[in-house]
Amino acid sequence: MLPVVLAVSLLMGAASATPSQPTAKTYDYIVVGGGTAGLALSARLSQGLKNATILVIEAGEAGLGDERIEIPGRRGSTFGSKYDWNLTTVPQKGTGGRVWVQTRGHVLGGSSALNLFSYDRASAHEYDGWEELGNPGWNWDSMRAAMMKSENFTSANSQYYTGSEGVGTSGPRRHVSALAGPNHFVLTERKVAKVNLEATAEGNQRATGVTLVDGTVFIARREVIVSSGSLLSPSVLGNSGIGRADVLAAAGITQLVDLPGVGENLQDHAKIQSSYELRKNYTGYDHLKYDTAYAAKQLQLWWEGKTSMYGYSGSGYTFANWNQALGDDGEERLVALAHEAIGATDHPVELKKLQWLNDTTVPDGYTGVKGYPAAGSTGYGKDYFTLIAAVMHPLSRGNVHVNASDPSGPPLIDARYLSHEYDLRAAIEAIKKCRAVALSEPLRSTWVSEYEPGLDVATDAQLREFALKTTLSIYHPVGSCAMLPREDGGVVDPTLKVYGTTNLRVVDASIIPVLISAHIQTAVNGIAERAAEIIIEEATRQMLRL
């Protein structure tokens, strides 16, 4: 098990501390999306380019001061709220036509304002894989350094002396608003319709600014940076005339850059879970849901700066490869199935996943623990724990595109969940492993009964049906504007510039070429840091030439 991570990204708070409603119409850099990457990137740009002006345009509200965002114990309560884009997939053929929820942050801070406080890194070989796929400079060393830049750790006191101040529950506290300079502007509750492009003499497209859905135009002197996330950045590009010809034509959009990779290569972690009713001598997080008096007392303790259940923020995780989880025979069966599922493909992303299946340093799955069930469901009013399992490198890859019938509305998302037999079989083996863990001491002594799927669900056929009906997204979409060579379906080059443009970049999870064995927020922070370094270095070189 990994310990609860005491690492926070200060940059997100930095940029969101003072949202403004700027009146100027021209800025040096315009960032489309005030989410995890957009805020971290823009804050760093404001620090590194003090003479440049940076505008962040966020479609959602600021969300500052909302308990659902700022209190750790309220995590998850924003799902399905006004802070959620409330996106869904098209019916998924791999799961019998079931529509999957796609929670994404519609608020300053993006999905980092909605997530469940999980912060970890993938294996070194996975980041090195980005470079091996054709992206010089993107590897474990550079990404580790970038991810560490946005972290801060304050340890607990080991000794207590008069006058000392440790972490405790009331201090020390760091105000982060100063991290973003006075050249940083944030516009909330305004949605970008498209990036404005004009042709250059060399035949490329130059971004001149953006147009909002209300018709307002903002001009960018230097660059436009799209940071709208894996499910929305492809729509921003598509509505701007960048993408596959047939997709744009169906939506009535004039193609300016022929880039078939836009919206393709979509990948996501899918989870399957088993839940257990705790014995009465154990208190679970669910107690806050069904006992209002207890919840009120705990909330008061939180506001008083005392130890409280609302300060709980962690789950336990273990990452493992198939050999560690299933042994030699189980690993051989799944690896053989993966090769069969992929067939004779020569696509570098799928070949990289096959390579990682045989790499003992790269995890294939993980399990986590968190509260369950939801209000109103059977068994509500008791305490539970849940074992969640997820396949780290599913072979299913989907797409997300502008909706031809409503280009400015929600995109059409087809993640193709469980479309590969390997992914489904892996989910079945994963839920079996969860149950085996639950049945092992000392964990077995903590629970009364298996709530889901129930111990009577035991055969492979029954578990297959359970997987098809209950497997859900963990909300880690990546890859839809992949950083890959153009001939491999790439959308951005190693400087994160969109192919066919001179000054338009994408900076968010959508550029990750292959899904990693980790919660993606850490990598997104690292991507923002790397992007800031690249942009600042390029801007500095240009100024020196003047």
Image (tube, grey):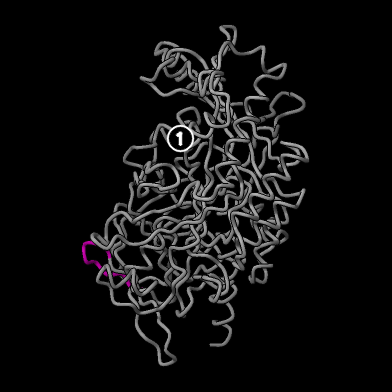
Q: Measuring 37% from the left and 51% from the top, which residue is drawn there? A: 19
Closer to us: 458 or 442: 458
The residue at the point 47 percent across, 32 percent down is: 75
Residue closer to the observer: 415 or 140: 415
The one of 149 and 288 positioned closer to us in this rendering: 288
Residue found at x 46% / y 80%: 500
For the N terminus, the image quarter is: top right
Q: Is residue 64 above or below residue 353?
A: above
Tell whether 234 sits left or right of 117.
left
Q: Nearer the viewer, residue 323 or 86?
A: 323
* Residues shaded magenta: 212-219
- Give above or below for 103 relative to 290: below
- Picture coordinates of residue 541, whole percent (x, y): 59, 80
Q: Secondary structure at mark 1?
A: helix
Q: Residues within 10 Å of mark 1 (few under 14, many from 20)?
A: some
Magenta highlight on residue 217: yes
In this view of the protein, can residue 308 be seen by the observer? no
Q: Which residue lies most toward the left here? A: 214
Height in image: 412 above or below 211? above
Residue 254 appears at what percent x and percent y? 29, 77
Q: Is residue 492 magenta?
A: no
Q: Amino acid at mark 1?
A: Glu
Q: Which residue is mark 1?
A: 70
Taking the view exactly as shown, the residue that stands out farthest to the top is: 280
Q: Position of residue 334 (x, y in %)?
A: 67, 45
Left or right of 517? Residue 267 is: left
Q: Is residue 155 left or right of residue 473?
A: right
